[in-house]
Image (spheres, rainbow, N blue to C red):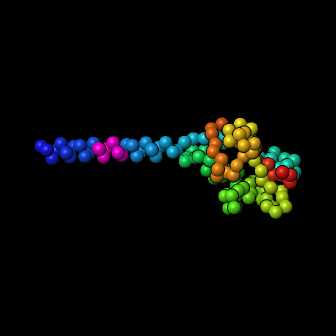
Amino acid sequence: MKKNILLMGLCAGMILTGCASQSDTESSIKEVSLDIVVKDEVNDKELFNETLTKEGDIENLYDFLSKCDELEIVFEEGSYGAYIDSMLGLKQDFDKGPWWLYSSENNETCKEEGMCPAVEKLEINDGDQFVFSYTNEF
């Protein structure tokens, strides 16, 4: 009898632990929608203007953009982390331009800092809006 009670307690503990682990996994997976505008300022064209929704373990702009196959983004590693080297077939020339820059008027971090930090450091929220500009000017 004592063994049965011990065994039942052990099984209950394992079930509870399994449920807690599953709940932790589910909490990191979320759905995020961002309004994305992509402008080619060199040729004065708007290349993309849509709300994109992605699902997964998304904490920052890099996580989100990595899931955006429709933007054809190529990242490179720099001294401050990943940066956008190419988008929609337009490659930047890191030394002399044009460059890929991005901004947001409603992302809290971008507003507080007066500019958006590196993609891997920029936490995002559902509904944030970003403008990506291919430009010769800073």
User: Residue visible at 55% across and 47% down?
Assistant: 56
**Splitting the image into 4 quarters, where does residue 17 fall?**
top left
Left or right of residue 79, residue 15 in this image: left
Question: Magenta segment range?
Answer: 13-18
Left or right of residue 28, residue 46 in this image: right
Mark yes or no: residue 129 visible.
no
Is 46 magenta? The answer is no
Percent from the top left, x then y, of residue 114? 75, 42
Mark yes or no: residue 120 visible.
yes
Of all residues, the one furthest to the front in this rendering is 113
Percent from the top left, x then y, of residue 111? 72, 39
Percent from the top left, x then y, of residue 21? 40, 46
Foreground of the two, 134 or 101: 101
User: Residue visible at 72% across and 43% down?
Assistant: 113
Foreground of the two, 83 or 35: 83
Percent from the top left, x then y, of residue 3? 15, 47
Helix, strand or loop: magenta stretch: helix
Left or right of residue 41, residue 24 in this image: left
User: Residue visible at 52% across and 44% down?
Assistant: 29
User: Residue visible at 41% across and 45% down?
Assistant: 22
Q: Total marks drawn?
A: 0
**Splitting the image into 4 quarters, where does residue 94 fall?**
bottom right
Left or right of residue 33, residue 100 in this image: right
**Splitting the image into 4 quarters, where does residue 46 fall?**
top right
